[in-house]
């Protein structure tokens, strides 16, 4: 062991001595078995961090749809019963340019329907004639023309108390004649002939035909109020009458306006409203039901008869 160590040391001393000699003579010195230079190790790339878990994206709320463009509101149609504004300049002339035929029902030999009050007979023709006279007065006061198909020279407007009953006098004659009025087709044709003659005489006037009656509705006692029967071609007058009577709550509750000859309502095809009548706007107004005690009271009351007349005139004023 000591011998090996001595050999190693001796070898190292010889090598050192040789290198010193070489340096003195200026010769390059080769390193003894130089260790190869080690390349610096490339840093290993850091392991990528795991991407954080992504939260599911919240769905974006859908953009609100633009509201559809609003259509301009259609103007509401004027109510057929809307009151007309009063015009001070036409007071006393509201019906100027109108020609109206007033046809009080029955008369003369035909008393018409009847009701009973305190054991006395309440006769249709006497009371509807009184209403027709009141309408005639109101139309003329407003500047219109008015003609009655019947006349009674002995009787004018009567304002008796409701407790007093008009007597059945049967004085009425056809307009322009001296003969007592009669019923049936012959009598109706005489009324029509007079009305048509007046229509021809005043062709530039607005024209209306209004027959005035009082009804008997079978045996029904609960039916009360006014009913309007219109010809097939008459719309404006019937509608206006419905408004004026409806305003004062005088119309019947069921089917207050019906067409002439409509079998659904038991309406006969009334001769006076058919083609022989040449006036376009023509109606028959039933003021009440003789089977109903309230209606029988109303027709005897002069205040109510005046209200009936005023409703008819207001209907004419309300027509365009």
Image: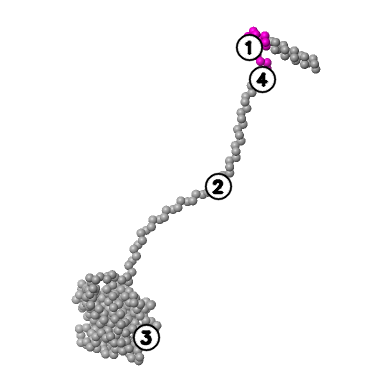
The residue under label 1 is 28
| Earlier residue among tags 1 and 3 | 1
Q: CA distance from mark 1 to mark 4?
A: 18 Å
| Earlier residue among tags 1 and 2 | 1
Q: CA distance from mark 1 to mark 3?
A: 157 Å
| Earlier residue among tags 4 and 3 | 4
Give me the residue at 46% from left, 51% from top: 63
Stretch of the chain drawn in magenta:
19-34
What x and y, as percent, mark residue 177?
20, 85
What x and y, as percent, mark residue 182?
26, 87
| Earlier residue among tags 2 and 3 | 2
| Residue 112 shows up from this direction | no
**Based on the displayed image, in which of its 4 quarters is residue 126 positioned?**
bottom left
Colouring chosen for the image of the structure: one colour
| Earlier residue among tags 2 and 4 | 4
What x and y, as percent, mark residue 216?
35, 84
User: How many marks can you see?
Assistant: 4
Give me the residue at 20% from left, 75% from top: 202
The residue under label 4 is 35
């Amino acid at each position: 062991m000591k011998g090996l160590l001595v050999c190693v040391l001796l070898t190292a001393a010889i090598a050192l001595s040789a290198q010193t000699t070489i340096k003195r003579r200026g010769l390059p010195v080769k390193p003894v078995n130089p260790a190869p230079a080690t390349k610096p190790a490339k840093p290993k790339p850091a392991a990528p961090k795991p991407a954080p878990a992504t939260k599911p994206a919240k769905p974006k709320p859908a953009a609100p749809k633009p509201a559809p463009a609003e259509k301009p509101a259609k103007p509401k149609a004027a109510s057929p019963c809307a009151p007309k504004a009063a015009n001070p300049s036409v007071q006393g002339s509201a019906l100027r340019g109108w020609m109206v035929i007033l046809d009080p029902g029955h008369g003369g030999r035909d008393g018409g329907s009847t009701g009973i009050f305190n054991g006395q007979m309440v006769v249709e023709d006497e009371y509807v004639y009184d209403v027709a006279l009141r309408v005639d007065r109101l139309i003329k006061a407003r500047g219109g023309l008015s003609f009655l198909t019947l006349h009674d020279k002995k009787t004018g407007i009567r304002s008796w108390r409701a407790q007093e009953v008009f007597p059945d006098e049967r004085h009425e004659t056809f307009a322009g004649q001296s003969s007592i009025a009669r019923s049936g087709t012959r009598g109706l044709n005489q009324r029509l002939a007079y009305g048509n003659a007046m229509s021809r005489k005043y062709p530039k006037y607005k024209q209306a035909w209004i027959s005035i009656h009082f009804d008997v509705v079978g045996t029904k006692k609960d039916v009360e109020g006014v009913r309007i029967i219109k010809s097939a071609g008459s719309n404006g007058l019937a509608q206006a009458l419905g408004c004026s009577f409806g305003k004062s709550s005088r119309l019947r509750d069921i089917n207050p306006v019906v067409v002439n000859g409509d079998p659904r309502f038991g309406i006969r095809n009334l001769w006076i409203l058919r083609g022989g009548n040449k006036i376009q706007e023509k109606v028959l107004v039933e003021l009440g039901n003789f089977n109903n005690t309230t209606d029988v009271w109303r027709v005897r009351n002069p205040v109510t008869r005046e209200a009936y007349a005023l409703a008819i005139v207001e209907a004419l004023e309300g027509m365009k």
